[in-house]
Amino acid sequence: MGFEYAPAPESRSIVDIKASYGLFIDGEFVDGRGSSFKTINPATEETLAEVAEASDADVDLAVKAARRAFRGWSRMSGKERAKYLFRIARIIQERGRELAVLESIDNGKPIKESRDVDVPVVAAHFFYYAGWADKLEYAGLGPNPQPLGVAGQVIPWNFPLLMLAWKVAPALACGNTVVLKPAETTPLTALLFAEICQQADLPPGVVNIVTGAGGTGQAVVSHPDVDKVAFTGSTAVGKAIARAIAGTDKKATLELGGKAANIVFDDAAIDQAIEGIVGGIFFNQGHVCCAGSRLLVQESVADEVLARLKRRMGTLRVGDPLDKNTDIGAINSAEQLGRIRELSEIGVAEGAERWAPACDLPSSGFWFPPTIFTGVTQAHRIAREEVFGPVLSVLTFRTPAEAVEKANNTPYGLSAGVWTEKGSRILHMASQLRAGVVWANTFNKFDPTSPFGGYKESGYGREGGRQGLAAYLKGADA
Ligand code: NAD
């Protein structure tokens, strides 16, 4: 039993949420020509704001504005473009608390994550790519790198501002202009980012934000004057987008789902591994494409690891995302909660054993306790499909070869984790695991200098690092 904590809520008075929001096109907020939708606080189900649903005609205006802006932006010297990006990065830092609170209200993630992870990494991305803007010819991507043109970018709801940063910062550094569509359940920080672009005096049309659901996303990616499509989201939608742009000369990067193995060997520092397992799957309610959602633990230490893991899970605090002590916030939407419940019930029906610590969940809002399944086999749907929630499947292995085989037995290939005290084993495993990122004795670490992306159904292309520039330059291959 842990101590009871007194509530320590972050004040929401720092954010000014308007009753309604238009679209950000050509440097101005404008009314949409389509309908509108509501965005809610998933922790309370309270309506936060009415947001414009961009129609095809609105998307067309945004693409035209981006095309007009491209002339000036792409010809501006890299040094000048960098000044804008550095300015944006600094404003993000200055308004960091406001961004973090708004992100937690609209998304449901704990304030300690939006404050200590999302917003600092967002600023770091802008600083990092600002640094590249005047050094593109030294990136090893050709002597005279040229931007692609207008980038159509569609992002998911799990890291709304961070996914925006991953897409907007390298695009702008390379001299492209963008039309970005945030996810329908989390549009507010992208709209605050639009205000930051105004504050930074970014030339009109360089960044355009169109809100809406799948139809708006479709209009963005299939617009004939969009030269580059950057998508992060589910594998199903990624495949639909790949089909929609097949036969065009649009360049594309797709960052899709994952089902990462987090592999614990018997010589691992078990307490550190427990923290890595917990961070790997319960960080951001498990709404993480690279979440360590399959724990592979060596049979000889399985009982010990499970006992310590359960004890640690019993200390996790689920509840108010704005409380600074909260470890697990709200599930982002009723729809996502439904999917997590459905897959968990399938896990039980298929014979796996479900365990969650006793925890009081708030009466309104969308909540799911941290949960583990034991007795899971590779054939179980909870071992194969992305739950995208705080649900961990536990499997065991005896030898490193078996661990590799099980880890790679997935349609995905985004990330993996290895816990062992042996350096040689880390190197061996990293060479065998078919995953874009392999973490050793840590998990879910994000850094703008490091490329991120997947194999197989996790998509193609890399974001972050020098490699992330290639996705926004003509003829460049990372
Ligand atoms: P989603 O695919 O349903 O939606 C993603 C975005 O695509 C949203 O903005 C949505 O409105 C839009 N969209 C929906 N249909 C579209 C269409 N036909 N054409 C164009 N756009 C369309 O995914 P989600 O539920 O919002 O996000 C969760 C998924 O994202 C998970 O599968 C997760 O693994 C993945 N993800 C991947 C990464 C990565 O880097 N690989 C990062 C975060 C999330």
Image (tube, rainbow, N blue to C red):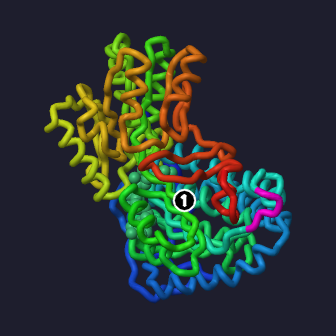
Q: Residues within 10 Å of mark 1 (few under 14, many from 20)?
A: many
As drawn, 300 above or below 16: above
Q: Residue at x 31, y 26 (%)?
A: 395
Ligand 1 contact, mark 1 (Cβ < 8 Å): no
Q: Which residues are magenta?
A: 142-146
The three-letter code of the residue at mark 1 reads Thr
- Residue at position x 46%, y 78% from top? 219
- Residue 157: x %, y % from top left: 45, 58
Magenta part, dominant SS: loop
Which image quadrant for residue 94? Answer: bottom right
Residue 126 in view (yes/no): yes
Hey, which quadrant is residue 44 in on the image? bottom left
Q: Is residue 20 above or below residue 231?
A: below
Q: Toward the viewer: 250 or 390? A: 250
- Left or right, 460 with respect to 260, comes to right
Q: In the figure, is residue 17 to the left or right of 88? A: left
Q: Residue at x 26, y 50 (%)?
A: 363
Answer yes or no: is residue 108 visible: no
The residue shown at (43%, 26%) is 404
Q: Secondary structure at mark 1?
A: strand
* Image position, residue 380 (x, y; %): 23, 36
Residue 91 placement (x, y as % from top left): 71, 61
In the image, taking residue 111 as reference, residue 122 lies left or right, namely right
The residue that label 1 is drawn on is 253
From the viewer's side, name the closer residue of 468 and 66. 468
